[in-house]
Image: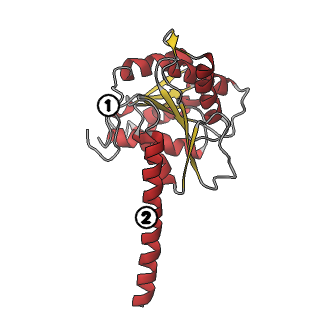
Amino acid sequence: MLSARLAEYLKFLRSLLVTTWRLIWGMWRLTRFPQPAITIFGGARIKQDSPFANIARELAKMLAGHGFSIITGGGPGIMQAANEGAIDCLRECRLDDEKCRYRMVSAGVGLVRLNKETANPYVQENILMAHFFARKWLLVRYSVGFVVFPGGFGTFDELFEIVTLVQCNRMEKVPIVLVSRAFWAPLEVWIDSQIMPHGLISEEDKNIISIVDTPEEAFHILQLHCSHKEESNTYDPEAKK
C-alpha cells in the first residue's frame, strides 16, 4: 500500500516538474514579444473566408499597427486569421506611420496533441503546453485585453474563465470584447432572463463584457482601456486587484 502511494506521488511529482519547466520556458519565450498584448480567442473550425475570420484578421492588423502584440491558441480558424493579421502589419513594416519598431508580434500558445492541430503558418513563436490549465495561464498572463469570436466549447471555456477571474478579483478589470451581436445575443438574453432575476450575478458583473460587430468598435474599446499600459505591465491571474 505504501509503495503504491509513493509510486503515485513520484509520478505526480515528475509530471509537476515537467509542467513547471514548460511554463517557465513558455514565459521566457512569450516575453520576447512587446507589451501590451491582446489575446484573441475563437473557433478553430471557422473557415478563413468567413466574415468572422475577416474581422479577426483586420482587427489584429489594426492592433499590431498600434503597438499591440497578438496572442492566440496558435491553431487554425480564428486563431490563424488573427495571427495572419498581425503578420500583415509586419509585412507592411509600418507602425503608427513610422518604421516598424518590433519584429515579433504574433504568438501562439498551443496544446500538445490537440485534435491533431499544428501551428498555423503565421505564428512567429509556437509555445506548446501539455495541459489545458498551463496553456490558459499563459494566454492570460501577458494580456491586457481579450477578444472572443464565435466558437465552440473551448472558446466558451476560455471566455468564462476570464470573466470569472475578473469577477472574483483574481485579475484586474480588463476589456473583454465579444464579436458578433447576432452570435452572442442568445447569451445576453439568457443572462438577462435567467441569471439576473435569480440574483446569481450583479449588474456590475454583467458589464464585464462588451459586445460589438465591427473591428473598429473592438479596436476602440481595446485602445481606450489598454493603450496606456506600460511595456512591463502584465496581469497575474493569481494576484488580487
* 3D distance between C-alphas at marks 1 and 2: 39 Å
Mark 1 vs mark 2: give the one in front.
2
Position of the C terminus by quadrant:
top left
| Rendering coords of residue 49 (x, y %) | 73, 26
| Rendering coords of residue 146 (x, y %) | 46, 32
Image: 200 above or below 1 = above
Image: 19 above or below 90 = below
Q: Disc 1 or 2, which lies upstream in sequence?
A: 2
| Rendering coords of residue 122 (x, y %) | 64, 33
Position of the N terminus by quadrant:
bottom left
Mark 1 Cα within 10 Å, few/some/many (few <14, many 20+)? Answer: few
Mark 2 Cα within 10 Å, few/some/many (few <14, many 20+)? Answer: few
| Rendering coords of residue 37 (x, y %) | 45, 30
Query: As shown in the figure, which amino acid type bears the numbered disc 1?
Result: Glu
Q: Nearer the viewer, residue 150 or 140?
A: 140
The part of the image, by quadrant, that contains residue 94 is top right
To which residue does mark 1 refer? 204
Query: As shown in the figure, which amino acid type bears the numbered disc 2?
Result: Leu
Point 60% across, 55% down: residue: 112
| Side of 117 where 20 appears, left or right | left
To which residue does mark 2 refer? 17
Tell me the SS state at disc 1: helix
Tell me the SS state at disc 2: helix
